[in-house]
Image: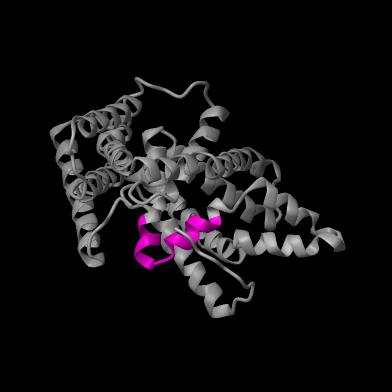
Amino acid sequence: MEYDRTDLSLDRLELLRIYGYGLCMGTADALPGVSGGTVALLLGFYGRLIAAVTALTPRRAVAVLGGYRSDRRPRAREALVEMDLQFLIPLGIGMVTAVVLIAGAVSSLADSHPVALFGFFTGLIAASAIALGRSLEFASSRHVVTAVAGATLALLVSADIVQLPGGGRTVIFVAGAIAISAMILPGISGSLILILLGQYVFLSSELSAFVGALADLAGGGSLAAVVDPGATVALFVAGGLVGLVTIARVVRAALARQRDLTLVFLVSLIAGSVPAPLHNIGETHAWTTETIALTFGWAALGAIALFALEYLVGGFDPE
């Protein structure tokens, strides 16, 4: 897709509209089962989003930084237009606003009502796999093998049978790279990747702690309280920036060359991730008849919410 932006002028109403796009996209990405990329498609700015993200290159960044010299300012302005920062910045601020608000709610609910929260997420993920899978065709054995491979990989990761190499900071960095890349892909949610990697609750709590510590610091609180969660957030964001210029491009190239197989793999990852939230419930609750019934009830509610959203927007498409 191509999207050309030839001017830098934006009125306040346009900025507010883009900020609203960011709120919608961030809300979708913060909840497993709904993709921010799908929201971008539905609201009609997906082409511009992809064009802007793929324009974020080191060469253009260097050109912008070189704008302090008068002879390089024309090229710096040209690079700014190419990267469409007047679109990405308010969009990003809106996304961050939504993610911060939802992260606080997730952290609280994960402690107080884990069955309700993760049961609801299970229903969202299962329903999104069904909704997206309807449009896929399994025309050959390669499609079947790809689907089995994707679902199996997700199941093995969610069961901790397959783990990322290293731990701690390495996992956070890699999680950021994969999750933020997924945010711009229709059909797969960044938060779903975090649940699959077992980092969703931890990163939500760290983000909430960081924001809370910043608020306390403004009122005379301790700087030390900002450092630890701030380092985690910074590492995640750094991974995300790397992911945007690497993994996201790889997936887009795969979609261009082998669209059907790539979509089958992505949707099968979602299908294989359905049990992932249940591990969070199992950490705090024994699987009694009551727990199973409550989980099933909340999962049904999550599925109904997803199918209702699908009906209202006229259907989802994985690309």
Magenta span has 40? yes
Q: What secondary structure predominates along the stretch shown in magenta? A: helix
Q: Can residue 304 be seen from the camera position used here? A: yes
Residue interval drawn in magenta? 38-52
Picture layout, residue 260 above or below residue 308:
above
| Quarter that holds the N terminus | bottom left
Q: Does residue 222 appear left or right of residue 86 in this picture?
A: right
In the depicted structure, whether residue 52 falls above or below residue 295:
below
Residue at image position (86%, 63%) is 70
Single out the residue that lies furthest toward the right.
Answer: 70
Res. 111 in view: no
Front-most of residues 267 and 229? 267
Q: Observer-nearest residue: 201 or 115?
A: 201
Q: Is residue 318 left or right of residue 307?
A: right
Q: Position of residue 108 (x, y in %)?
A: 41, 48
Residue at image position (51%, 57%) is 51
Image height check: is 272 above or below 305?
Answer: above
The x, y position of residue 36, in whole percent, is 40, 55
